[in-house]
Amino acid sequence: MRYLREVRVAIIDNGINRDLICKEKIQAQIVIDENNRCIEDKNEIRVTDFQHGTFCALIVEKYNSHCILDSVRILDKTGKGGIEKIEPALEWCYQNNIGVVNLSFGTTNFNECEKLKKLVNKYVYNGMIIVAATANSGFVSYPASFTNVIGVATTGSPLSYSEDYLQMGIDTIVPSEHMVKFFDKEIKTSLSNSYAAPYVCALIADRLSIDKTLDIKKLKDYAREQSHTEMVGGVYEPDWVYKAYVTGRKKTSRADYYFETVSGEFSEIREEVDTVIACSVADLESLEIKNKNVIYLGKEDIYNIDVQGFFWSGEIRRQQILNNHYQGNGLEVPVVILAIEAAIDSFYILTELKRAFARDGYNAYTIKMEPECVLYGLEYMPEPVADYEAWKTFIESQVFYKQSDLVIWCVSLDDKEKFLKVYPDCDVEINLCNEGENILARFSFENEKAEKRISGLLDRKEIDEIYHIIEKKLTEDEDG
C-alpha cells in the first residue's frame, strides 16, 4: 500500500461553489479585494453564474479524491480580472504552504510577460508547483509557456497544438471534456484548455502525495509522459532563472540580466542559487552542479556533463528549429537589420530598443546571434549556415505565435552583407560604428538614407531617438 500525504491544491480563479464541493475538502476560501488584500471570500455563487473555478475544482476532485482544495478568487463572475491580483494570490499560497496551484487562465499580452516570469520563478524557486492552461486562441500565453510552469492544452482542439507545442511552451496535451456532478445531474465540461489543466493538476498532486521531493523538472517530465500526443522532451526556453551563479569569461554590458545573481565561492553560496551559467565545460567540471539548472554558453561538447535540472545551450535552440512544423505564408511584419560594430554594447542597445517599442505597445521579436543574449531576455538564433529556409520558417512561427509586430535582427557589422541575403528586402537597415569618440548611425529605408552622430556612449535618450526614427518610418503609411 502506498503512503499518501494530503496535498493542498489552490484553484486561483473566480471562486468555488460551496454547494458542489464537500465542505471538508475546502480548507480556505479567500478573495483578493480591490486593494489587493487577501480576505475571506463570503461570495455566494448562484446556479446561473459562470462556474469556471467550480468546474476546475470538480475536475481536480474527480481525479484526486484525497487532496485538499483552496479557493483563491481573483476573477469576476465573467472570468475576467487584472494581472495585478496574481502576485498577492501566489503570495497567499506560499504563506499557506500550498503545494500545487491551478491557473486555468493566462494572458497573451507581451507587456505582462516579464512581471509574470519574475513572479513565477520566485515562487517555483521556493517550491511551488504551478499548472496553467494555455490560451484557447492558439497564441503563446503567460504563464503557461514558461519553463517553470507545467503548460497544458486540450486534445481535440482544431488548432495545431500537436505540431507546434514547442513554440507554445506546452508540456502536455490531455482531455478537457470530463463528466462531473453538477447538483443533481452529470454534465460534461466543455472542450477548453481551462479544463485540461485541472486534470493534470490532479495527477501532479497525486504524484506529490507519494513523493514530495519531486521538483518542477521531474513533474514536467511526468506530465509529458501523460500526454495523449507524443511530445519531444528537454527542449526548454532559458526563462526559468531566479538566482544564478555566473562563471567564466563573458561579455560585459550595461544591460541588466533578467534575473538576480549571487557572487562568492560557489561552495558557500550553492544553496542560494537555482542555476549555474557557464561559458566552458571546464567551468562546469570545476563545480558541484548536482541538481542545479544549467545555461551553457560555450561551443564545446557538453554531453559528458550530468545536468539533472533544466538545461539550455545553443544546441537546444537548434533542436527547436529542426522540430518546428509551422507552415505559414511568409513573414508579414517589418524586418529591421541592425548591424553593430563589435566594440559597441549591442546587448544594451537591443534591450533598450525592445523596451522603447514595448512602451508604445509594439512587441519586437529581438534577435541576437550570440548565446549570452538569452541572459538579457533576447532571442538567440544560431547562424543559419546550413538551411536558411528552416531558420526563416522558425522566425515566422515565433512571430506568429508570439504576435510580434516587427523583427529586429542584430548582426555583426563585418558580416552584414552575408546576412542581408537572408532578408534582402528588409524594411530598415541600420549600421552603428565608432567614429573617433562618437558613434555614427546610418539608416537605410528603401531608397532613402540618413545619418546621425552620437557623442560618447549610447544612452537611453539616444536609443529612444533611434527608436522614434524607426517607428516613424514604419508607420508613415498608416499615418497617411
Image (cartoon, rainbow, N blue to C red):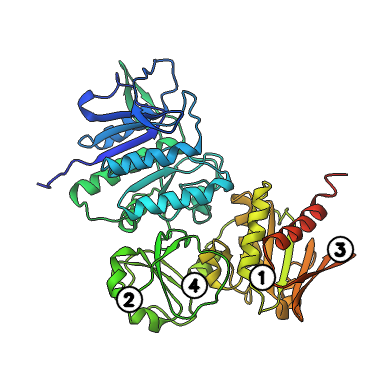
N-terminal-most mark, 3 or 1: 1
The quarter of the image holding the C terminus is top right
Which quadrant of the figure has residue 137? top right
Between marks 4 and 3 in the image, the one whose residue lies nearer the viewer: 3
Q: Residue furthest right?
A: 447
The one of 459 and 119 positioned closer to us in this rendering:
459
Q: CA distance from mark 4 to mark 1?
A: 17 Å
Q: Which residue is mark 4?
A: 315
The answer to whether residue 129 shows anywhere in this view is yes
Indicate left or right for 443 with 178 as reference. right
In the rendered view, tell whether residue 170 sits above or below residue 319. above
Q: Measured along the vertical axis of the image, is residue 167 above or below residue 40?
A: below
Q: Amino acid at mark 2?
A: Glu
Q: Is residue 45 left or right of residue 337?
A: left
| 4 or 2: tag closer to the N-terminus | 2
Which secondary structure, mark 3? loop
Of labels 3 and 2, earlier in sequence is 2
Circles 3 and 2 in contact, beta carbons < 8 Å? no
Q: Residue 265 bears which disc, if any?
A: 2
Residue 81: where, in percent of width, then height? 50, 32
Give the labeled residue for mark 1: 388
Q: Nearer the viewer, residue 329 or 100?
A: 100
